[in-house]
Amino acid sequence: MAEEDSNTTAETEEAISEDDWAAAMQEQADIDTASAAKEAAAVAQPAVFQNFAPGAKPGTMNDYELILDIPVHLTVELGRTRISIRNLLQLAHGSVVELDALAGEPMDVLVNGTLIAQGEVVVVNDKFGIRLTDIITPSERVRKLRN
């Protein structure tokens, strides 16, 4: 009788494990079917894009507010020159390097390497500054790129 009980227990465990395996396989098949249906639905839906037209909806954030805190590099360029490495190595304290800009010529103001304005040097509270005298418009920048 003990032998019959152990055979019945073994058969029951085998049947349970087969049932568990079949249930797990069915569950995986259901998941695969559901994910395939989601992908098909996602592909079939038309794309929705935000409208960037000038007439923005009232109550939305001004587009410029998104970029106001991004830092940029502002450079004021006094002038440039080209010298050989030999002359560069001969520079010492008190050496004078001639630039291509003339005295009294406006300085270039660059933002991230792009010319945006020109101005003249001023001194305010013992610090140098620049007074903008000419702002370069986007159309002028494009025209200068072509030349």
Image (spheres, rainbow, N blue to C red):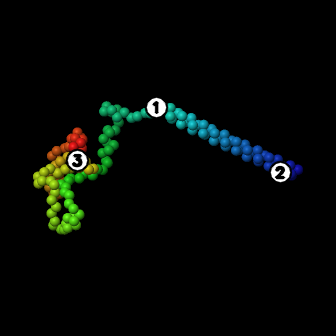
Look at mark 3 in the image and give the residue it sits on.
Answer: 115
Side of 24 relative to 137 (left or right):
right
Work out whether mark 2 precedes mark 1 in sequence or the reverse, and give the earlier one: 2
Q: For residue 85, which quarter of the picture?
A: bottom left
Q: Amino acid at mark 2?
A: Ser
Q: Circle 2: is it few (<14), some (14-19), or many (20+) Cα within 10 Å?
A: few
Residue 22 in the image, given as x and y percentages of width and height: 70, 42
Residue 145 at least partly seen? yes
Q: Amino acid at mark 1?
A: Pro
Look at mark 2 in the image and give the residue it sits on.
Answer: 6
Residue nearest the viewer, comparing 13 with 43: 43
Look at mark 1 in the image and give the residue it sits on.
Answer: 46
Report how far apart the C-alphas of labels 3 and 1 lie in the structure.
42 Å
Work out whether mark 2 precedes mark 3 in sequence or the reverse, and give the earlier one: 2
Q: Residue at x 69, y 41 (%)?
A: 23
Residue 58 at least partly seen? no
Q: For residue 147, which quarter of the picture?
A: top left
Q: Is residue 6 above or below residue 51?
A: below
